[in-house]
Amino acid sequence: MTAVYDYLFLALKRAPTPHPALATQLRDVGGPAVTATGGEIVGQFAPQLGWANDEAAVLVRWNGAPGDLTPILASDPIASARLDRLSPTLRPADADTFVAGGVHVHRWFEVEAGAVDEFVELSGEGWKRFETLFDARIFGLLKADPTPRDTEAGVVRLLLITRYGDHGVWEASRDPTTEAMQIFARRQQLTRRSWAASTRLVTAG
């Protein structure tokens, strides 16, 4: 059975150390409760570039029917949350995990609805070159359940999460002369809009 994912984009309450506080709450309360209903917290992310300092994301994987997110959403550090339900494309596999350290870039794409299969195919083709050239690893390319706005606009949203060794690796990987970037340039032609943020993976101390 292919897993499904819940991507929670969070606004945190004002506090001296909101991200470590959230990590502790997830470790001690939210995580065990989610595990008890067939899920797992795969990653918590704090901002580096592109998000406000009080924003965060949590990725939850369900290996069956999605369960109750209340134990996470009720965590004291959370002020508000936006949920996207995601399905994996070529990656991640059901047991994949994040590697600590480095930079995790979250990039959203709005893709023409009729071009999603081609977009995914080009992504897989480009990854083969990309991951051999750079200290980078794609965790996953996940497709979001459509909102009414998506349907009206004729787009599908996809979330790409990639780990880079550091921001210097990310900058080097933008080289347009590489075969990987030439493939991604073709993919960009299918994209109406994209936006990204660099984050760090958070663990409870």
Image: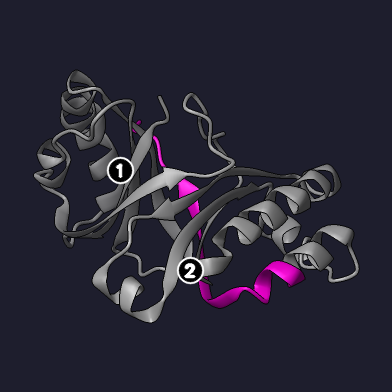
Quarter that holds the C terminus: top left
**Relative height, residue 90 to residue 33 (above, below):** below
Confirm whether residue 115 shows in the render: yes
Q: Is residue 152 above or below residue 39?
A: below
Task: Report the disc number at residue 3.
Answer: none
Is 190 in front, or is 129? 190
Q: Nearer the viewer, residue 205 or 111?
A: 111
Measuring from the top left, give residue 27's x and y in whole percent: 26, 29
Colouring: one colour
Q: Is residue 17 visible?
A: no
Residue 204 x/y as whole percent: 34, 33
**Which residue is pictured at 24% across the width and 22% down the height?**
38
Tag 2 and tag 1, C-beta contact below 8 Å: no
Where does the magenta region start and end?
Answer: 185-205
Callout 2 secondary element? helix
Please determine whether, in this image, residue 85 is positioned above or below residue 41: below
> Where the N terminus falls, by quadrant?
top left
Would you say residue 40 sits in the magenta stretch? no
Q: Quadrant of residue 13?
A: bottom left
Q: Tag 1, which secondary structure?
A: helix
21 sits to left or right of 166: left
* Disc 2/disc 1 C-alpha distance (Å): 39 Å
Residue 137 pos. (x, y %): 67, 42
Residue 171 is left or right of residue 158, and the answer is right
Q: Which residue is mark 1?
A: 20
Residue, x 40% and y 68% (percent of image)? 51
Q: Quadrant of residue 167?
A: bottom right
Q: Which residue is mark 2?
A: 113
Q: Amino acid at mark 1?
A: Pro
Q: Residue at x 36, y 70 (%)?
A: 52
Residue 196 falls within the magenta-colored stretch: yes
Foreground label between 2 and 1? 2
